[in-house]
Amino acid sequence: MTRTTFTLISTVIAAAALMVLGPPVSAAQAAPASTATGSGCAPVAIVALRGSGENGPGVIIPRRYTPTVATAGWEGTIASRLLSEFYRSTPTAAGTPIVQVPGGPGGYPAVKVSLVDDVVTEPLQANPLYRSAQAGVRRALAEMARFRAARPDCASTRFVLIGHSQGAMVARGVALAAPEQVAGLLLYGDPFQLPGRATTAGPGRFGTGALRLRYGGQAPLIDRFYRLRVPLREVCHRDDAVCGVTPLGIALSIKGYPGPHDTYAQGDTAAARAERAADVAFLRSVVLG
């Protein structure tokens, strides 16, 4: 297999793995306030960024994590699993606010993946997935600014960013745009993953992010993120064709679509429980200091 063929196939499979089906956002869903807070203004708040296509009923549903922390559901499936475990196991963080990044007009579209557009589009900046993520960056920064401006004691609040898939792209962009406001990042299934970093966990950590592979000439731009001095944890599962592309991973993703891209923060195996415990411990360390 030539490198060109490998790159093309890996991008197609990665795009398929990124795809999450769901109907478009309704006006009613776009209406809820984008910030849900607990009591008081904590020094660190949580910003959770959903993956591609997570916009429809059954995904964007109201959630309550503690008596004082509830959301309209814009955090998406993966983050909601993690946050449920985090709040359940960390009573001292029961009032930690969640800042939501909604869809709708002017919001974060979290568009579905287009197998054609995301394979053939040049340059990266014209890719629909990248443009959707950039819209998410703008809305996330606006919501963070709104949160800080709401009360005088919130002006110095910093944010821990949790991103899955396309949401990891948003988290990266937010951290690059406002590093002084970012307390840490926890990323799942990052399409820009750089293989073999010490900050990456999971058996897919030596794989390459699909968009990194697709747009290899943009690596200097992509890798500015890794020069930031903020706590970072990335998690990539084996055979996740979005974050951990390998020749074997392509074959297994074809056979087992959609594969393990949506399996983060869940599972009852010893390995899954250990990974989830490490994710929660990382989040706890950032939130509580």
Image: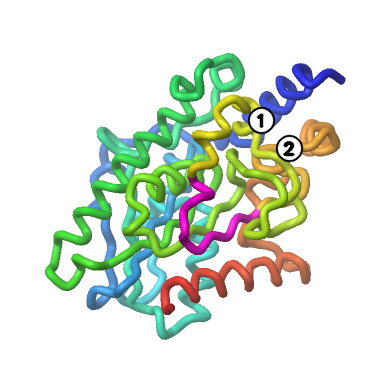
| Residue drawn at the location 48% of the way across and 29% of the way down | 129
In this orientation, does residue 182 appear? yes
Residue pointed to by mark 2:
245
In this orientation, does residue 70 appear? no
Residue range of the region highlighted in magenta in the rendering: 225-235
From the viewer's perspective, is residue 62 above or below residue 109? Answer: below
Residue pointed to by mark 1:
213
Q: Are marks 1 and 2 in contact (CB under 8 Å)?
A: yes
Classify residue 12 by image quadrant. Answer: top right
Q: Earlier in the sequence, mark 1 or mark 2?
A: 1
| Residue drawn at the location 61% of the way across and 19% of the way down | 119
Q: Quadrant of the N terminus?
A: top right
From the viewer's perspective, is residue 50 above or below residue 210? Answer: below
Classify residue 24 by image quadrant. Answer: top left
Q: Within 10 angstroms of label 2, few (less than 14), some, or many (20 or more) residues?
A: many
Residue 193, horizontal then vertical, whole percent: 62, 43
Would you say residue 165 sits in the magenta stretch?
no
Numbered tag placed on residue 27 in the rendering: none
Q: Within 10 angstroms of label 1, few (less than 14), some, or many (20 or more) residues?
A: many
Looking at the rendered structure, the kind of residue marked 1 is: Leu
| Residue drawn at the location 71% of the way across and 43% of the way down | 244
